[in-house]
Amino acid sequence: MRKTKPIGTVPLPVPTGDLALTIHVEYESEDFATNAPAAPGNVSVTFSVVGTLGGHTIDLGVRRHNVPVRSLPADLDGLVATEAVAGLIAEYRQRITDLTIQLARLGVATGEGIAVVFTVNDLEFLRHCLMLTELRWREAIQTAEAAAQQPDPDDPSEPGFINIRPTPVGFATAARLFGAELARVEKLTTWAGQLLDLARDAAGDDEDPQ
């Protein structure tokens, strides 16, 4: 049975301060758990680095498998200087950069908005609601366009009331206004879908129920 344990924490400088990176090791051999430097040369382990900021864990899936134990130093500073762990830290930093670029492309990492945390389920529900809103606007457009082509009905008004029906031009104008709202919702639906793809990638979930 494989076991995982933290073996040390190092700071990773970021614009908002230092991000705490905890180095974890995953192993099977008890030789590593009791006396890693003296472990047999054929023993290998898996290293990972996981960030922590404000009490929140940031696991970006950075792993290095099959690292020989024999080549590892016993102290944390020496371990961080090895190609295996140093490469992991560099990869973690690069993934943060890549994630920031993706968010900027989606219009999230800008000074015009605030960062909001959504789960995959949250984003799936948000996209579902936006798609339903698209459907309602399409129905409204179809109704207005159809009404613009119909003659005025000769319906008598009820006592004390006056029937006022929009003109064909009025219905056509309403259809254009509804179309503008539809375009706005379609843009939001696309944006939510892109965020959902990004969230699924981060969670390792490729399924799309729709």
Image (cartoon, helix red, strand yellow):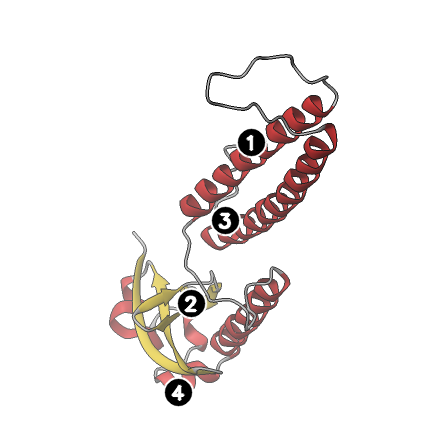
Residue extending furthest toward the bottom? 77
Residue position for label 2:
47
Residue position for label 3:
200
Q: CA distance from mark 3 to mark 1?
A: 28 Å
Q: CA distance from mark 2 to mark 4?
A: 15 Å
Position of 205 with respect to 2 (left or right) is: right
Residue position for label 1:
136
Residue at 33% in and 58% down: 28
Q: Amino acid at mark 1?
A: Arg
Residue 169, image x, y percentages: 74, 33
Q: Amino acid at mark 4?
A: Asp
Position of 42 with respect to 148 (left or right) is: left
Q: Which mark is residue 77?
A: 4
Q: CA distance from mark 2 to mark 3?
A: 23 Å
Under circle 4, the secondary element is helix
Residue at 50% in and 49% down: 200
Residue 126, image x, y percentages: 47, 44
